[in-house]
Amino acid sequence: MRPSGRAPDQMRTLSFEPGFTKHAEGSCLVSFGDTRVLVTASLEEKVPPFLRGKGQGWVTAEYGMLPRATHTRGAREAAKGKQSGRTQEIQRLIGRSLRAVTDLQLLGERQIVLDCDVIQADGGTRTAAISGAWVALRLAVDGTMGKLSADPIRTQVAAVSCGFHQDTAVLDLDYLEDSTAGSDGNFVLTADGAIVEAQLTAEGATFDEEGLLRLLRLARIGCGDIFAAQLKACGR
Amino acid sequence: MRPSGRAPDQMRTLSFEPGFTKHAEGSCLVSFGDTRVLVTASLEEKVPPFLRGKGQGWVTAEYGMLPRATHTRGAREAAKGKQSGRTQEIQRLIGRSLRAVTDLQLLGERQIVLDCDVIQADGGTRTAAISGAWVALRLAVDGTMGKLSADPIRTQVAAVSCGFHQDTAVLDLDYLEDSTAGSDGNFVLTADGAIVEAQLTAEGATFDEEGLLRLLRLARIGCGDIFAAQLKACGR
Amino acid sequence: MRPSGRAPDQMRTLSFEPGFTKHAEGSCLVSFGDTRVLVTASLEEKVPPFLRGKGQGWVTAEYGMLPRATHTRGAREAAKGKQSGRTQEIQRLIGRSLRAVTDLQLLGERQIVLDCDVIQADGGTRTAAISGAWVALRLAVDGTMGKLSADPIRTQVAAVSCGFHQDTAVLDLDYLEDSTAGSDGNFVLTADGAIVEAQLTAEGATFDEEGLLRLLRLARIGCGDIFAAQLKACGR
Amino acid sequence: MRPSGRAPDQMRTLSFEPGFTKHAEGSCLVSFGDTRVLVTASLEEKVPPFLRGKGQGWVTAEYGMLPRATHTRGAREAAKGKQSGRTQEIQRLIGRSLRAVTDLQLLGERQIVLDCDVIQADGGTRTAAISGAWVALRLAVDGTMGKLSADPIRTQVAAVSCGFHQDTAVLDLDYLEDSTAGSDGNFVLTADGAIVEAQLTAEGATFDEEGLLRLLRLARIGCGDIFAAQLKACGR
Amino acid sequence: MRPSGRAPDQMRTLSFEPGFTKHAEGSCLVSFGDTRVLVTASLEEKVPPFLRGKGQGWVTAEYGMLPRATHTRGAREAAKGKQSGRTQEIQRLIGRSLRAVTDLQLLGERQIVLDCDVIQADGGTRTAAISGAWVALRLAVDGTMGKLSADPIRTQVAAVSCGFHQDTAVLDLDYLEDSTAGSDGNFVLTADGAIVEAQLTAEGATFDEEGLLRLLRLARIGCGDIFAAQLKACGR
Amino acid sequence: MRPSGRAPDQMRTLSFEPGFTKHAEGSCLVSFGDTRVLVTASLEEKVPPFLRGKGQGWVTAEYGMLPRATHTRGAREAAKGKQSGRTQEIQRLIGRSLRAVTDLQLLGERQIVLDCDVIQADGGTRTAAISGAWVALRLAVDGTMGKLSADPIRTQVAAVSCGFHQDTAVLDLDYLEDSTAGSDGNFVLTADGAIVEAQLTAEGATFDEEGLLRLLRLARIGCGDIFAAQLKACGR
């Protein structure tokens, strides 16, 4: 039995609130249950130094957590003077995931920065961030289609966590499940069925091929729900 | 005529949404028009090193702005590795303002940290932060009264900006007014009529005693509105 | 009775020693009693990036305190690896104050950096710094008038602190008064009577309009003395 | 055809040189072909703050790359003043992998730090580091068994990369293959057949379940070779 | 002929102004011609962590240069966020030099920090700093003799630079000579004739034993003058 | 009697292993007994900003110590976020030493960076680094002679430490001697007999002219051995 009473293959309540802030070219407040992440997409008419003059664009991400997004207050990274290894790992993952569905040539010499700031954390902040980032990116690109020759977004991308809770494979772990899971992982999938990233970690209990495939099957179910919600949020 | 069509002594629409996040002992999403700041109050059963063993508590604040809270994206302070002088100036001001209405002896050896994170900026983020921080502080103290011998909050505190827009003294400047004001300032006032802080700066045009008093009179009007809204948000 | 035996509206002994160092385009060792600040003005034939090609100049300030300028040794900011919030707040204030009396167009594409280093502290280091910075700036501009079409310095600027010591409004607080004042503030005024900055803070006791005006009246008296001493130091 | 002429399921020449340095409790120079990593295991009779007094030990890792380990010189992280996101991601992975096979209770209140410094890079530095770290850890524990009640190392751990090179699944990618692989990943496995970590990333081409399983099968082959070489290096 | 017209074995005008600041336990403004360094000695009733409980004291130094002590303004180290290699090299040298004449056992569990801040630079700032630091240290120890069983200062220490200017060995190089010297060095000597430090560097022209001994002979002459001036400044 | 049983004027076993890594233009693993330093020379077709457009090249060095190169593990400088004063002092010394024998005009607008990383420390890491750096530099220049009009390396440079161990002057101190030496120093000499650097420090016991000359005589003996070994390593 899951602490939340959910079925093993049941997502938490999903919500994508597009246009949550007014300045960004695209924005979205995404909720996976009590996990809430504000994503903004900022379109800049320039690219990072390593891409200058190469005729292509870039999509990158930054991730942060408000100090009291969590049960006990964490130190503010700006005050500590550096981003943690965890923060950097997550923002690199978000960037790679979104670039996997973007045609950087079609974007032209432009950069889109996806800022993912966790307002409230209850497990799965990185998967919510990736899923919400696609909505913010979609909205930002929609608003700039006048400058583009074709749509640079090839398909949808979404992410969800899965893991073993008391030996049962469950979908979309909340904080309680995440902190006690024997092993878990995050899957980043595209709407056309491909795997973009799979990251599995054994914490306590290790796993095998069979376990890996069971988690992946759950991830496909969860991402299906997310894809539908993303489209609806973008009015598609 | 103000760009927003407001009367010179008219505040923007005020909103205090208490309990915006679930983990913090107190929280509030405060809006002064399009300026929105999320404030959380975290109660910690410890004090900073310089107060250990002195039998009193502490109230302090940290301030941050999400990278795309503004018209154009600003660099993330956590990524730059340091807080700007502006950020530090503001968080020191918020801390002083809230300590001015708190009896630190009555708080006991506890610290309350007020995290003020700007979700969307349209002028007056520091005054919204101070005003919202009082609500978050009030809620956090309400929730911990069982541990306290008496209420450590002496009175309400609120803040508002005033300035000269096209030679007219106006209340609660939005971004458009703020960026063109000849001179302006921020006032921090208590509900019993005292001035806690007054900070006036001439940018372009200097001012005199008469001007200073006119701005202060507007500030008293604006803070009156804020005090009423704060009480309502706290259910008092 | 003030600890120093001074009358409430009496400044400490003022001294401006121009040309204290030989390399700077302008320099001044300013003393407000035992508070001593060395100010140098460095003229650079370049402007900060945000002003390049705009045909105007810039005036900025940096502030530091020697580790043993104070009663007990403070950590060296260069060794700690960052400037404190207090340091940044003060150097921003000095910069704004001097820019308020400078015509940046007339300065041309040049920058003047005012370095204010506290040799010995006894209260009022920021007001001494601003007052001395005007002398260093005046001397630096005098020495470069051959390159300028007209004098970019419109008028004098000076600063002084005022506050309530045992319920009496007093002028130019020394360290003993400053550390026990109920509320105090700093005023930056120009020689033609305008207010450039007013920063009042209640520490312990709050204040009201009447108190604010009494402090401002004292500040006008003190700045009058400073203006006279500045002119004499510059040989005008 | 692989650039190196290896068969798809063929590892590069493996070499573990135990005792490469004299001061460390355990050390090993590991080579996966031209990739060479020096690993030292330092045993410290203390634990990190979060574990003090809990009666258990800790195993952690740090990773670095000599500036000219690569084709073109990279900036020295000590001179830049921070470790890159990539460095932090890798050292977190190494630490998790070794902890997965260590009984931290049996280790007692001791910490073992695994320093993995890349002398020469040719693809697969993180997998070589994990595999060599097990040898250094084993040697350090062997040397301290007199203080321990039982062996805290449960089994062997090894890591290897796999990926698709020109649509063929290949084992242990070198730099040439790694930089052109459509998708690849790193597997961390134990000698008793469990998966500790699986990290797969699509760069360019995405993959599916079938691909994932093929890579995992290759990883099992490669880790078998590594396990044998580890034992031999430890004289077991 | 030296640019200053001095004889090869002639020091610049020496001046030690004791008690330059009022808060420090010992202080001295030392001048070697136009090079002026303010040294303060701060006595602290504690020692650094590595000496706690060992029954001995410590003497250490910090060095800084005001941004406009030099011909062109240098960046402020506190603003850059780190001390340069040159700064660290110099402050380590000053600390070693003063420890060489101090009996740290007799000092007891106390630390004396020597802050050496260059007000104006014209060559030889480190040698002036060492020579002035001895005066500040002497004064600080004189003022604390009531707490000490015996005088911990064994003898005097002084430093001077020497070098080859146009093939002539000259004493106490000023900036003009220093910047064109073929090779030069700094000698730290004690009043009883011993060498504490000798640092010689060939910049452009190398040197040999004969040259080394000629420079050392000059250094003995210069330090003789300094020792006499130090004693006079301390009223001995 | 020396702990190692060596004669006073006897070097440790010297070894220069050229071409230790494959990517660098020049590389060398140098051993002075148990002290082992890996030096790589990286040739870059650019110069630092202060030399751009001046038609000359630059030679510079960076120094690092692997965390467990020493008896007890030291903190990793990249993780601490800064290089120690000792590290900076050493890398500045290495750079100066190599520039002393290089004609920077003949090098053209190129930079050679010498990375000196200590694999294992047993005293004399900086002298081994300088001596090994010459070999790496020589190899890098040999490999690029096709682009140069003439050989920019004027002569060989080597370094060795000397000091007083139990009142006997000894050559090439190992860690045991170094940590107990009354006074010691490092000499950097060229193959044509000139002194490039001489740095002597009294730790405990001071020294005099006679002692200085005795140490220098030993240094000439030691550098003779090193020069021969360098040539052999370079195949000359």
Image: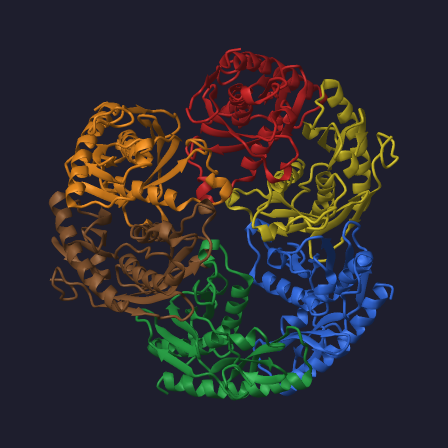
Chain colours: A green, B brown, C orange, D blue, E red, F yellow
Horizontal side of residue A190 vs C141, given as left or right: right
Percent from the top left, x then y, of residue B182? Answer: 18, 51
Q: Nearer the viewer, residue B182 or C198?
A: C198
**Does E80 appear above or below E199?**
below
Percent from the top left, x then y, of residue F142? Answer: 72, 48
Percent from the top left, x then y, of residue B111? Answer: 42, 55
Q: In the rendered image, which quarter contains the C terminus of chain C?
A: top left
Horizontal side of residue F235 vs E148, given as left or right: right
Q: Nearer the viewer, residue A8 or E27?
A: A8
Residue at the (65%, 18%) spot, across then down: E216
Total tally of numbered discs in the picture: 0
Horizontal side of residue F5 vs C108, given as left or right: right
**Does D216 appear above or below B114?**
below
Q: Nearer the viewer, residue C41 or B125?
A: B125
Q: Nearer the viewer, residue A216 or F188?
A: A216
Q: In the rendered image, which quarter contains the N terminus of chain C?
A: top left
